[in-house]
Each structure stands twice: as structure tokens, then as C-alpha cells.
Amino acid sequence: MDGFLDPTCGGVTELRVHGVSGTPPASILNHPHPRQIAGDSTTGFYRRWWPGGRPDGEQADVPGARHREAYAWGGLTSGGRTIALWLLLLPFSLANLSYFMLPRPPGGARLRHVTEAAQRLFALLLTGTLVGAVTRASVDLIGWQCTAAGRACARESAPAWVHWMSELWGAEPSRRLAVAALAPFAVVVLLWWLARRTWERDEQTGAPHDGGSRPGPLLAQPRLWHGGAPVWRLRAVHVAFALGSIGLAVSGPFVGSARGLALTAANVVVQVAAAALAVLPAIARRLAPGEAVPPWVTGACRVLRVAGPLVFVATIASAADGMSPALPGRQLPGLGFGAFQFGTTLGLGLFILVATTVLARMDRQAGPGDPIERRALYGMAAWFTLMVAAGSANVLALGLMFWTATFFGVPASVAEPGPVDRRLYLDDPVWWTAALVPLLVAGFVGVAVALWLIRGSAAATLTPKLTPYYGAYDRDVAGKWALAGLTDRAGLVLAVVTGIGAAGSGAVTVIYRFHLFAPVGGLAGLLASVGSWAMTAIVVGLVLLGRRTYSDTRLRRTVGILWDISTFWPRAIHPLAPPCYTERVIPELLARINTLTRSGGDEVVLSGHSQGSVLTAALVLQVRPELRPRVRLLTHGSPLRRLYAAFFPAYFGTRGLSAMRDAVRWTNLYRLSDPIGGPVFRRVDPFGPRPAGEGEQTVDRFCWDPLQPGPGEPLPEARWHSDYWLDPAYEETLTRLTRSDGAPQGRGG
């Protein structure tokens, strides 16, 4: 190849790791001609290529001396077209996040283990919620109601692809249910295929083996990024549970016959076995390379993996052959399983609330007293996030049911008088839940107004302080800084939304259980109708967004930001969530560091921007101790303290961050105009005197943004969260790190 490309590994390598939205290699390297030197089409390492030959200048690559290299991992979250399907899996991702938010105080291990078991069972019920929604829409609304003789789909105007069932089997419900059950079965197969495909791609990536567990914080444990076996076990449990729920919907209406009763019992056994396995600690235990769980646990998962599909096939085959008599009812007889699942979910939510409260209190009492240490929602973020997962799952589920009822007929409450006609009936709790949507919207509006007022107050406080630096532009800069500061109020949004949802769910439960009144007519009926249309619009909007995401690369990168943030953590309790990219990124970066530091004089500067700073910070604790003196860490636009330490204190709290600082020499660049990044160890007052002792041992370095204009010059454009690599402070810091003696900072901030 003509031109110049430096493929050597000796000397100093600046290894840049990008943040969210799949930044292309050309932007990472700030060079128009990147060339891949290692990796594959999904992830890879890139260097600069000069078509005119070897360049001159201080920043050019010099073989055996210095190199600039980029690691691009965006293909894991925004490269494939299947990301369009991930939009519907957000509740599963939130459930995994809640696991890592759980406080881990000393002395609270037993309660934490019980709470983790409850979280795994809650995650299993989330699978049941979404699969159950497809089942209810297909098996109940279409198979049982719409295609029955004389109902909406029996009309000539009904779509031909459902009308034929009414023509052939209008009076034979079991055969209609057998056909309708194929839709949720296809969804389960799709979820299984996506989870297995990404599991083989990411969680099976092997890391350099350098022993088992090691002392230090949780992020230093190699087992954290070894999820192949536990994710496989959890996937077998969730798929079996989902198939059992579909089978119950098909066999339940026929318990009056011996065959229907036997099949119902078999499906119940599958679901109970799945739930029992889900609460076992060993089912999701992550072990260091070479360790193993008891063989019977894996054996039980293998049995369930076979039993679930077999029972489902037997149920569908029997229903297709014809079963009778069927229980009467305008709606699919549920035998109380739906109510039992709802009650179990509610009970688990209450238990996790109490347990998390106790753990958070214990954690605060045992805290280090660091003045910068701030627990999001007072340590209760795990419960709030889990409730948001449940809420989003219910919005998707109910939206699908309302859309189905609207498309094939007219959604109706069982309390509405009058003839059946084209009505497709939904339970009263469904309508009451829909009535909560307008209240949630009102809550969002209230929070938005509060945040706007907070921004105005903060800008007014900052303006006089900024006048000596920005002159007439002081109010403009103050507004930017105040807007960026609203990120610290993320807990407020989460708390308000969860509070409204939890209170509303409790009210719905009381109203329904005591039959206080029906969601028909009046204000309740209006709210329910508005909410039903809103949830239908949400589902339709997600489908349209997913369809466009499938074909639009730029939109795929934008949507990928959501997964860049939510899939950093492993699939600890929900195996059907979008995959954890870190389980592939960490091993690949470790292997690359080993390659770049083969000789004694080689050094690597890990330069991580935004989410890349989280990856590189977690990486340094996985680097072998003998290599750490030759590794530097340069983070910029980093959410480590602002978001990760606040929401995941057990992993990124003061203990974890201090271990990173002690492991390698580290500098963190941040701006007050950055809505995501911030300081890691201390908040610097840019208007005050420079703190005593600040110098080479200081991690955090403040960068002005926008840059201060000269006399008569316009205000430079603010860079916000971007282009730290172009900031003058970046090159200065990089030079200082590569000329240092390699000693870690010790206890300085």
C-alpha cells in the first residue's frame, strides 16, 4: 500500500476510546484517512494513514517511538440492523441496571442475596409481562374473541388473514387458539435467537487468563466480565417460563377436560420450575475462569430447556386436534394466573423497596464520609429503576393490546352495557392503568417547569461571577453552564415518574379489588380513553422508529446512544436484554495493551472520552499489576463521578475510583458546560484561588468552555461535551503524562 502507515508497537501509544453514538475512526483520530490494523468488522483498532508518505511534525506517528491509535467499538451497539428490535427490550435493560445499583454495605450480604433473588424473579415476571401481552393480544383478543362466531373478525370486512379462522373454526375455540399462539411463540423464538446470537458474539469472548479472583474493589474482579455460563442458564429459564405462559393461555380454558387439565398442570410445572431456578444464587453466579457452579444446577437448566418446548408443542398439538368443553366467557378464561402474577409482582416490588431501604441505610452509615460522595436518590436508585422497568413494560404491553383491539374492533370495558357487536373486551385494570398515562404526562410537565426555574436561578447566580472572564457574554455562558448542571437533577425526574406510577398502581389495585367503580364515563373514562390512545401511539411510534432505524445508519447511531449507556453492565438478571458490549471490549483492550507493552520501555496512554472513560477506568483495574506502571489514564467528558458513582456506588464509589487512581497515573479533563462529564475527585471553583497542593498529583483539571474571547472578538462556539481532543489542555496533559515517572497519584485528588 502506498503512503505511510505506522504498524509498529514499540514506544508510546496513545490509545483513544470513543464515547457514545459510535464515533467513526476518522473523528477519533482527527485524521481523514484511518486504516484498520487489528480487529474485525464489528470492533477494531485504527491508525492514521498518510497518502503522501511519511509526515513531519510533533503529532505525526514515528515508528518505534510514538503512535496515535483508536479503538472503535460502536458496531456493538449501533452497527447492526437488529438494533431496531432492541427498542422493545428497554425494560429488560433497566432491570439489569437495577441489579448493579443495589447497595452492598458491609454486613448486609445475607439481605442483599435475598434481594438479588427477588430481583431475578422480578426480571422473570417482566419477561412474562411482555410475552403475556403478545399472548393476550393474539390468543385472547384475536383467537378467543375476534374470530368467534358472530364477533368482529367473522364479518366479511375483517382482514382475510384472520377471517379464515372464523370461517373454519368459529365454534371450535381450541383450534383458533392453537393458531393464534404461534404469534407469541414467534416472539419468544426471536428473543431467543437475538439473545443467543449476541451471547455467542460478545459474552463468549475470552480474556487473557492471569489467575482467579484478586483482592480489591468489585471492578477489579475478572469474573465480572465472564458471563457466558450464567447468561446461558438464565436464558434457558426465561425461555421456558415464556413458553409456559403461552401454553397456559391455550390450555387453561379447557381444564374441564382431562387432557386440558393435564396440559395446564404441565405448563404450571414448567413455570414453577423456572421460577424456582431463578431464585437460586448459583443460577446467575459469575465465577472466575476455572471455577464452576454445582453440576446439578446446569443439569436442571438443561432439563428445563428441553421440557419447556416439549410441553408447549404438546399443548399446541392437542389444541389443534380439538379440545372441549371450553369454559364460558366473553374474554379468555384466565383461571386467576394473571392476577397471581400481578400480585406476585406487587409483593416483590414492596419487598425490594423495604430491603433496598435497609441496605441503603446500612451503606450510608458505613460510608467513607467523602464530601463529594453523593448517592442518587439516597441509595434507592435500584428500586426506582426497577419500577421504571416495570412501568415501561406495562406501557408497551397495554399499548399493544389497545392497538390490537382498535385495529380489529372496538376496545371496550367489561362493565360497558350493550350488545357485543365489534367490541373486544379488556380487563378493568388495563383501563385503569391507561388512566395513569395523562397523570404521568402532567408529572413530566411539572418536572420540566421545575427544572427550567432551577436553570434560571443557577444562571442568575453564575452571571456576575462570569463577568470578569466573558464580559458582555456573561449571561450567555451562564445559561450554558446552568443548563449543563441540570444533569445532577436526574434523580428528581426518576423519583417523580416512579412516585406517580407507584401511587397510581396502588390506587388501581384498591379500586379494582374492592370494585369501587368502573373506568366508564366521567373523568375516569376520559382519562382511560386518552391514556389508551396515548399508549397505542407509543407502540405505533416505536414500530415506525424501529422500521426507520433498520434502514437509516445515522438514526441507528443516534438510537445506539441508549444502548451505549444501558448495556455497559452485564446481563446479570435478565438474559434477553440487549447484550453487554463491555464483556467483549474489556478482553480486546486487555489483549491490545499486552501487545503494545511487550518490551520494558513501551507505554500506553488510555484516552477515554465520555462512555469511553468508563470503559478505560474499568479496564485499568483488569490490567496485570506488573504492567500498570507503563499505563496512563487520560479521561475527558467523564460521567464517572457524576452518574456512575452516584447510581452505582458499589462499583464506582470512592473505593473503586481511589483504586483506579492508585493503580495508574491519571488525569481527568472536564468543563462546566458539559452536561455529562465532570470532576472525579473534587469540585473545583474556577473563580477562586488555586487550591494548595494542586499540581502533578491532581487528577481533575478544569477546562474553560467556551474559550475566553479576546478584546473585541466574538464568543467562541461552546464545545459542550465534544471535541476534548481538540482542547489545548488535552495536548498539554498528554505530554505531561508521557513524560512523568509513572508513579500513581497516591491519595491526592
Image (tube, rainbow, N blue to C red):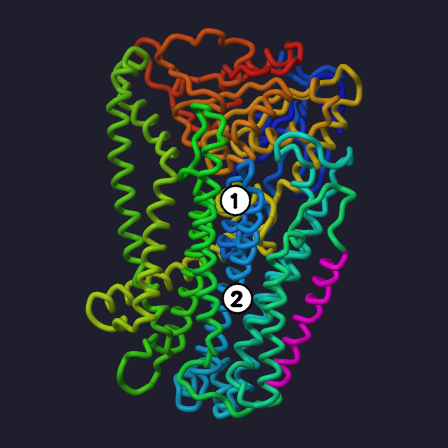
- Image spot of residue 729 (x, y percent): 50, 15
Query: Residue placed farthest to the left in the image?
Result: 522
Identity of the residue drawn at 29% across and 24% down: 476
Identity of the residue drawn at 59% across and 15% down: 745
Q: Indicate whether 337 appears above or below 684.
A: below
Is residue 78 visible from the viewing direction of this image? no
| Region of the chain picked out in magenta, as a range | 295-320
Q: Main secondary structure of the magenta part?
A: helix
| Image quarter hosting the N terminus | top right
Q: Give residue 566's mark.
A: 1
Identity of the residue drawn at 28% across and 19% down: 473
Between residues 453 and 165, which one lies in front from this camera angle?
Answer: 453
Q: Residues within 10 Å of mark 2 (few under 14, many from 20)?
A: many
Q: Callout 1: helix, strand or loop?
A: helix
Q: Which comes before the other along the chain, label 1 or label 2?
A: 2
Label 1 vs label 2: CA separation? 22 Å
- Image spot of residue 438 (x, y percent): 28, 57
The residue identified by callout 2 is 131
Q: Indicate whether 48 appears above or below 138.
A: above
Q: Residues within 10 Å of mark 1 (few under 14, many from 20)?
A: some
Q: Amino acid at mark 2?
A: Val
Between residues 683 and 479, which one lies in front from this camera angle?
Answer: 683
- Image spot of residue 448 (x, y percent): 29, 42
Q: Amino acid at mark 1?
A: Ser
